Amino acid sequence: MRLPLLATAALLSVLSTPAPAQEAPRWSLAIHGGAGVIERNSLSPEQDAAYRAALNTALDAGSAVLARGGSAMDAIEAAIRVMEDDPLFNAGRGAVFTAEGRNELDAAVMDGSDLSAGAVAGLTTTRHPITAARAVKERSPHVMLIGEGADAFAASQGIEQVDPSFFFTERRWQGLVKALTDQGQPVPPRLAGAPSPDQTAALPAPPLNERKFGTVGAVALDSQGRLAAGTSTGGMTAKRWGRVGDVPVIGAGTYASNADGCAVSATGAGEYFIRSTVARDICQRTASGASVQAAAEAEIAEVGAIGGDGGVIVMGANGSPAFAMNTSGMYRGSVASTQSPRVAIYADEDR
Ligand code: ASP
C-alpha cells in the first residue's frame, strides 16, 4: 500500500517519537508470602483466590502508609503485620511447628537510610514478631535478641503478648504430624490450649503435600527516598535444637541500603540463603551497577547452584521492584504511586 507523503511523514514521526519516559514512582512497595512448589493444580480455585485476597489486603495496608507520606519502615511493618495475623502464611498465626510441637518465630527489619537493623529469633508469645524486631532496632542497643529474653523485651516495650496456642493452626499441625511420621520421629502431644481436632474439623482441608515455605516479607521505597526491608517466619516444619534460619540474619534473609540502592527480603531454604549471604550480595550487585532484576536473578542462580530453593523480592532506589525465584511459585505482589496493586502466585505469571 502506498501512503500519501504527508501521512508517511506523520507515521514516521509517531514511530520515532520516544515513548514518554515512565514516571518514577514517588513510593513503591513489594511483598511476598513465601516461595516453593506451588503448581496451578495444587491450589483449588478457592485457595488461589484466598491467597490473592490476602496479598491484596497486605498491599493495601502498606500502601495506605506510603500514600499518606509515611515511612518505608512503617509500611513494611504494616504489610507484614497483616500477613502475620493471616493463618495462610508461615509467620505469626499459622507458623509451622518445631519437632517439639511449638511455634518459634523469627523476624528482622532493616532501614536502608541509616543501616539500622533489628532482629528476633525463637519468639513464642509475641503476636507480631516484626514489631518486636523493629523495637530491637529502635529501643535497644542491640541488633538481635533470641528466645525468652526476646519475648520479655517485647513485653517490656508494651508489644502484645499471647498464649502460645494463639499461633496454632490445624493445617500446620497436620504438616508436622506428616513430616515427623515420614521421618520416623515421635509426634509430640498437641500444643496445650490448642483447639481439639473436632473443633477444627469444620475448616476447609488444606493441601497437605505442599512443599512451600510461606515466610512473609516486604520491601519499600518511601516518598523521602528511604528504603526498608522486613521478613517474618515460623521457619521450617519440624525444625529442632533451636534452629534459626536466614530471616533474622541481617545480610542473609533481610537487608536494605540506600547507598547500595537496594532493599531485599528472601524466602526459601534458610541454610542456603545464610551460606550465600543472599540479601547483602544482591545489594552489592546493585551497588556495582546491576539492575535490581539482574541482581536478584544472578543471586538466586547462585543459591540454586549450591542446592537452595527459594526466591527474593528487591526494591530499587528508583522504586522498581524485582522478583526472582527458582521454585514453581512465590506468593507476591506490588503497588506504587504510579501502579495499582498486582499480585501473582505462579512463577510464569507476570507479577
Ligand atoms: N527462609 C525461612 C527459613 O529458613 C523459611 C521460609 O522462607 O519459609 O527459616
Image (cartoon, rainbow, N blue to C red):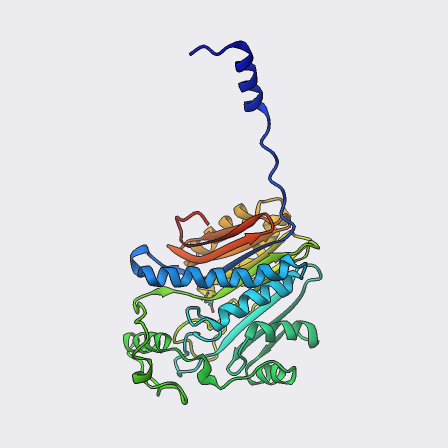
* Residue in the image at 41% along x and 58% along y: 307
Residue 259 placement (x, y as % from top left) = 69, 53
Residue at the extreme bottom of the image, as rendered: 192
Residue 304 placement (x, y as % from top left) = 43, 55
Left or right of 128, for residue 34: left
Q: Is residue 251 visible?
A: no
Q: Foreground residue, 41 or 236? A: 41
Q: Is residue 16 above or below residue 88?
A: above
Q: Quadrant of residue 137?
A: bottom right
Q: Quadrant of residue 154?
A: bottom right
Q: Is residue 119 above or below residue 350?
A: below
Left or right of 262, for residue 193: left
Residue 282 placement (x, y as % from top left) = 57, 53
Q: Foreground residue, 310 or 5? A: 5
Residue 76 placement (x, y as % from top left) = 59, 63
Q: Is residue 337 visible?
A: yes
Left or right of 91, for residue 336: right
